[in-house]
Image: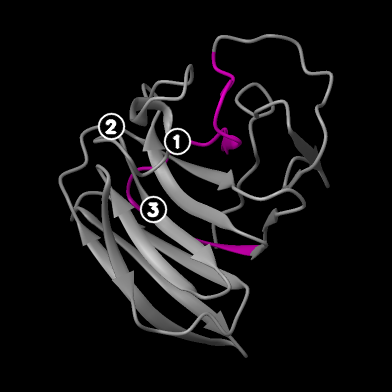
Amino acid sequence: MKKLTLDPNTAHKDLSLSEGNRRANRWTAQPYPDHPERFDFWRQVLCKEGLTGRCYWETEWSGRAFIGVAYRQMCRKGESHDSWLGRNGFSWGLSCKRDGYEVVHNGIKTAITTPPNSNKVGVYLDWSAGKLSFYRVCCGELTLLHTIHSTFTEPLYPGFQLSWVDSTIYLC
């Protein structure tokens, strides 16, 4: 399993990072300094690690969260789709909420019928094959939710959006 860390230079000011930059919680504004890589509208954060090859990681979530990947060049400023994870051609991912999952890329949503009876998601990236797979992790078992097929041209950075106040993600 790939060990990941959240990049505090990309974290929106409403996200509090803790546990060695492995947990993000959306709450009140943090005193982060301005940074050109910081998301300034969407409550999002990227990991420090750019991924190629094959790797797997797991994320626990609560509230409403988006778990995905993005190219480093993805826009960070403003409220357009260019800076919103899953809403542009530079990012792919899974929206997680109590009533279901959706895969999102370039603004196109695909509903997933598997119920979200677990708050843990596994992500498997096979970069050279162009596959990004999302799994529900429950009781030690993996259930495939969806596989995205694409052509990746740059390293992918795991990224997260916390849509509701008090939503959290934790990199297991």
Residue 61: quadrant of the picture = bottom right
Instruction: Calculate the distance from the C-alpha at mark 2 to the C-alpha at mark 1.
Output: 9 Å
- Of the numbered discs in the image, which one, if any, rests on residue 131? none
| Label 1 environment density (alpha carbons within 10 Å; few <14, some 14–19, many ≥20) | some
* Along the line of sight, the residue nearer the viewer: 71 or 109: 109
Pick whichever of labels 2 and 1 is earlier in the sequence.
1
> Residue 26 vs residue 100: left or right?
right
* Along the line of sight, the residue nearer the viewer: 150 or 51: 150
| Label 2 environment density (alpha carbons within 10 Å; few <14, some 14–19, many ≥20) | some
Q: Name the spot of residue 105 as percent of width and height, x first.
A: 28, 48
Disc 3 marks which residue? Answer: 93
> Residue 139 vs residue 88: left or right?
right
- Circles 2 and 1, Cβ within 8 Å, touching? The answer is yes
Q: Is residue 54 magenta?
A: yes
Question: Amino acid under label 2?
Answer: Glu
Question: Amino acid under label 1?
Answer: Gly
Residue 1: quadrant of the picture = bottom right
> Residue 142 vs residue 149: left or right?
right
Q: Is residue 52 above or below residue 139?
A: above
- Circles 3 and 2, Cβ within 8 Å, touching? The answer is no
Instruction: Calculate the distance from the C-alpha at mark 3 to the C-alpha at mark 2.
Output: 16 Å
| Label 3 environment density (alpha carbons within 10 Å; few <14, some 14–19, many ≥20) | many
Question: Amino acid under label 3?
Answer: Gly
- Indicate how the structure is coloured in the image: one colour
Pick whichever of labels 3 and 1 is earlier in the sequence.
1
- Of the numbered discs in the image, which one, if any, rests on residue 154? 2
Pick whichever of labels 3 and 2 is earlier in the sequence.
3
- Of the numbered discs in the image, which one, if any, rests on residue 50? 1
